Image (spheres, rainbow, N blue to C red):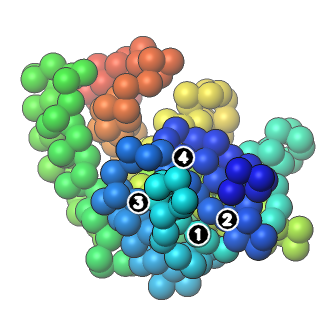
Amino acid sequence: MKNDKILATRTHKVIYQVGNTAVKVFDTNFPKTDVLNEALNQARVEETGLPIPKVLGVNVTEDGNWCITSEFEAGKTLEQLMEENPKKLEQYMREFVTLQLEVHSKTAPLLNKLKDKWDSKIAASKAINATTRYELRTRLSSMPKHNKVLHGDFNPSNIIVGEDGQYHILDWSHATQGNASADAATTYLLFALKDQKTADLYMDLFCEMSDTAKQYVQRWLPITAASRLSKGIPAEKELLENWLDVVEYE
């Protein structure tokens, strides 16, 4: 593995290309249950027919690290293409939203429910005071229940565009089922943490193409910000805390 090509380095994991496979190797202390849950999520989403790499195996390396082996998809990330071709940003963003709407058109009844996951995260968060936690959990419980497949980390770095132009969606570790607008709020937040103009373009196109009121997606923003805040990433803390203070968006 050490001599194989590194495709990406993420928190607690390194992804290698080994022949025509991609092997995601987790830190030694990474919970086994999280590894197995990620592989199971990916396998369940596979069954929907979405364009994602197939899981080929779950193993332990010689060093004792758990790993997930999947099909390798050659190409560039959509994030790379957006950076290389800024004049085509809107075109790429439309294709990105189209792909996200395809994800939301599917169901996978055995995936965990997003509302349950977020409620647990917010309830356990030490970064949010009790009054705000109560308000956020009350809002979350009142939001409409849906059962659409949600990626949970849908951003251009998780989309591979093959040489044939086909899109492939990577990294299903956060997959759940629930409300599509919650997933859109997460994607908006991920864009906003890097560039507000790109985030606004995404929001406009998502609402236009899904025929969703912007105010409805915005009602999810404090909730998804609270969920993200539990990750404890210092560079994101100020922006996320500002979003928690917004009880209603105008």
SS class, disc 1: strand
Of labels 3 and 1, earlier in sequence is 3
Q: In the picture provided, is 160 more to the left or to the right than 29?
A: right
Mark 1 and mark 2 in contact? Answer it, CB < 8 Å.
yes
Using the image, determine if residue 190 lies above or below residue 57.
above
Q: CA distance from mark 1 to mark 4?
A: 13 Å
Residue pictured at 19% horizontal, 45% vertical: 119
Q: CA distance from mark 1 to mark 2?
A: 6 Å
Q: Nearer the viewer, residue 176 or 138?
A: 176
Of labels 4 and 3, earlier in sequence is 4
Residue 115, horizontal then vertical, whole percent = 23, 54
Answer few, some or many: residues within 10 Å of disc 2's Cα (few below 14, many 20 plus, some between 14 and 19): many
Viewport quadrant of the C terminus: top left
Mark 4 and mark 3 in contact? Answer it, CB < 8 Å.
no
Q: In the picture provided, is 68 more to the left or to the right than 230?
A: right
Residue type of the residue flagged with mark 3? Val
Q: Which mark is residue 69?
A: 1
Q: Which residue in the structure is indicated by mark 3?
A: 35
Residue type of the residue flagged with mark 1? Thr
Answer few, some or many: residues within 10 Å of disc 3's Cα (few below 14, many 20 plus, some between 14 and 19): some
Q: CA distance from mark 4 to mark 2?
A: 12 Å
Q: CA distance from mark 4 to mark 3?
A: 11 Å
Q: Which residue in the structure is indicated by mark 4?
A: 13
Of labels 2 and 3, earlier in sequence is 2
Residue pictured at 52% horizontal, 53% vertical: 63
Residue type of the residue flagged with mark 2? Ala
Mark 3 and mark 1 in contact? Answer it, CB < 8 Å.
no
Using the image, determine if residue 132 lies above or below residue 164.
above
Q: Which residue in the structure is indicated by mark 2?
A: 22
